[in-house]
Image (cartoon, rainbow, N blue to C red):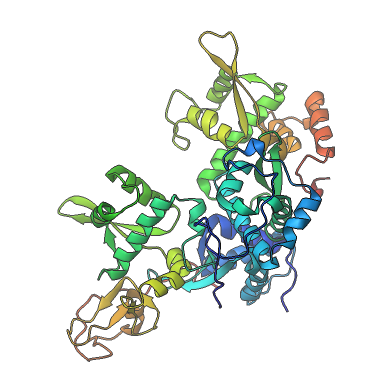
């Protein structure tokens, strides 16, 4: 197998043709808020100055970056992509992102979603429906998912916002006590309020004017796009030994969410 | 010649991304599962063709699912590797520059060692010579743990006069991915197995000072199987080392 000679990006100087710098890009690398997306004509102009191979190379690097970051379920910030990977190629950034999204879809079955259009943060969600009984992830990850789904379910059933004490009490009834170290989860409170929040599955927000400080939970941005409300309702119905339709309001909400294109469920659900 | 990717290929690829490396049995199992799930035909001997299809799409991305041999268990493994360069770039999304410097030092220590292992003490001491940010002991240990968790290094815990000592070797996945890099950097110091002619890190060495050939542990197991008096294939001296048992794969039925 032939080794492709890679142009080093760890050094600031590049051996390849330097892309034409355009005045629109910010001079400060860290200041992503100054960065305005180049227009289509600017992108086309930028592409003229690069070889196809250079664009391929850069796209591959961005893709790698996404894949590695996403393995940890950390949302990926545009500012970081710019600073660490795109660098001099920021004038063709829209083209790179377009190609990256396409490749993620066609080769990996992953969908690139911008969950925060203000701060420009991305996550990858799995387009492949996970069928019952087959799991690619190892044990601990599955248990965590189980716990997460229960919490998401509780929040959903209660109308979308729940005070934290209610969650802790309900979990206690399921033998998950935040006061004690759990066999599988360890520090449960930390898992829920830190890890799940960092991964954007949950939001943990201070309730103003509470003393001592109380928080409430709601669904996070990743849960909104990744988790099916229909499935959650079915899970809750199972737990209560009842039918999803018994909760008419939630049922309506879940199925209207399903029909909007923002849901990431596959067509087999319909 | 290579067909289009469908969801069974994508599922397999996603599993490879999660696992990093799988042995041959598990790969065959995954192949079966992916085909069953997405209702594509699964032909028993077509795993390599299946993987070739995926690889054809991965090639422009400088990635490959590469088959390699493990010197720990003598089994074939499949690993998802980055083939862009001779340097260790895939990790650069995950590890800071100074951490990669330490990792390179660890590779060097392992390559030049006789045992194919580096102790945590030696790795720690090597940080003294680093010109980039110097790492504290706890930071080094934390980094080594991460490298083990991410399957770049394998840790073997050795009890030495009641004190636990960590010895680190290169994981199979690391060897498969870094082989080009290691070959380029350490041409002179590399040990080669006399039997299978692959690179050898952890191996047995002939004690005849004029011979010194190296043989992987699994290769020793196979070569000296049922030999009552093992003799060095090169110099015919008695082979003094313990002959390991041949590693049996878990699922024998297929």
Residue A248 x/y as whole percent: 82, 25
Could you tell whether B13 is left or right of A254 in the image? left
Q: Nearer the viewer, residue B25 or B109?
A: B109
Residue A76 seen anywhere in this rendered image of the structure: no
* Image quarter (top left, top right, bottom left or bottom right) of the C terminus of chain A: top right
- In the rendered image, the vertical position of residue A263 relative to residue B44, given as above or below: above
Query: Which residue is farthest front?
Result: A23
Image mark count: 0
Query: Which residue is farthest left?
Result: B161
Q: Nearer the viewer, residue B129 or B170?
A: B129
Asked where in the image residue A264 lies, by quadrant, the reply is top right
Residue drawn at 73 percent across, 32 percent down: A233
Asked where in the image residue B238 lies, by quadrant, the reply is bottom left
Q: Nearer the viewer, residue A50 or B177?
A: A50
Could you tell whether A195 is left or right of B201 in the image? right
Could you tell whether B149 is left or right of A163 in the image? left
- In the rendered image, the vertical position of residue A207 relative to residue B158, given as above or below: above
Residue A88 seen anywhere in this rendered image of the structure: yes
Residue drawn at 80 percent across, 46 percent down: A269
Q: Nearer the viewer, residue A140 or B189?
A: B189
Residue drawn at 42 percent across, 30 percent down: A181
């Amino acid at each position: 197998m032939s080794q492709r000679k890679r142009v080093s990006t760890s050094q600031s100087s590049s051996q390849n043709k330097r892309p034409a710098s355009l005045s629109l890009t910010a001079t400060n690398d860290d200041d992503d808020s100054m960065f305005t997306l180049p227009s289509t004509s600017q992108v086309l102009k930028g592409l003229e100055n690069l070889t196809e191979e250079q664009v391929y190379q850069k796209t591959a690097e961005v893709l790698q970056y996404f894949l590695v970051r996403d393995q940890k379920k950390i949302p990926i910030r545009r500012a970081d992509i710019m600073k660490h990977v795109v660098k001099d190629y920021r004038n063709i950034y829209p083209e790179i992102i377009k190609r990256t999204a396409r490749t993620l879809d066609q080769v990996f079955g992953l969908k690139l979603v911008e969950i925060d259009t203000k701060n420009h943060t991305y996550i990858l969600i799995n387009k492949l429906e996970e069928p019952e009984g087959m799991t690619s992830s190892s044990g601990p990850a599955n248990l965590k998912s189980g716990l997460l789904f229960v919490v998401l379910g509780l929040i959903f059933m209660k109308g979308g916002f729940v005070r934290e004490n209610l969650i802790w009490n309900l979990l206690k009834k399921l033998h998950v006590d935040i006061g004690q170290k759990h066999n599988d989860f360890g520090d449960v409170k930390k898992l829920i309020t830190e890890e799940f929040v960092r991964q954007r599955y949950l939001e943990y927000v201070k309730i103003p004017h509470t003393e001592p400080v109380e928080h409430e939970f709601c669904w996070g941005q990743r849960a909104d796009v990744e988790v099916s409300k229909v499935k959650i309702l079915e899970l809750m119905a199972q737990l209560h030994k009842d039918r999803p339709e018994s909760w008419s309001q939630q049922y309506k909400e879940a199925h209207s969410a399903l029909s909007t294109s923002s849901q990431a469920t596959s067509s087999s659900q319909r | 010649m290579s067909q289009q990717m469908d969801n069974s290929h994508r599922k397999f690829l996603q599993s490879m991304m999660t696992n990093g490396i799988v042995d041959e049995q598990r790969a065959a199992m995954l192949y079966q599962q992916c085909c069953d799930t997405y209702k594509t035909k699964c032909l028993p001997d077509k795993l390599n063709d299946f993987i070739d299809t995926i690889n054809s799409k991965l090639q422009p991305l400088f990635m490959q699912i590469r088959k390699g041999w493990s010197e720990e268990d003598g089994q074939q493994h499949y690993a998802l590797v980055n083939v862009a360069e001779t340097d260790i770039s895939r990790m650069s999304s995950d590890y800071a520059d100074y951490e990669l410097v330490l990792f390179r030092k660890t590779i060097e220590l392992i390559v030049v060692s006789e045992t194919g292992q580096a102790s945590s003490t030696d790795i720690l001491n090597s940080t003294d010579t680093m010109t980039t940010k110097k790492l504290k002991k706890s930071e080094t240990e934390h980094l080594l743990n991460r490298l083990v968790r991410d399957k770049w290094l394998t840790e073997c815990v050795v009890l030495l006069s009641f004190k636990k000592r960590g010895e680190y070797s290169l994981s199979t996945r690391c060897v498969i991915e870094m082989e080009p890099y290691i070959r380029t950097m350490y041409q002179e110091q590399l040990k080669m197995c006399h039997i299978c002619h692959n690179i050898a890190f952890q191996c047995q060495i002939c004690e005849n000072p004029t011979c010194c050939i190296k043989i992987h542990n699994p290769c020793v197991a196979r070569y000296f199987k049922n030999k009552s008096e093992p003799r060095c294939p090169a110099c015919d001296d008695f082979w003094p080392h313990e002959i390991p048992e041949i590693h049996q794969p878990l699922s024998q039925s297929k």
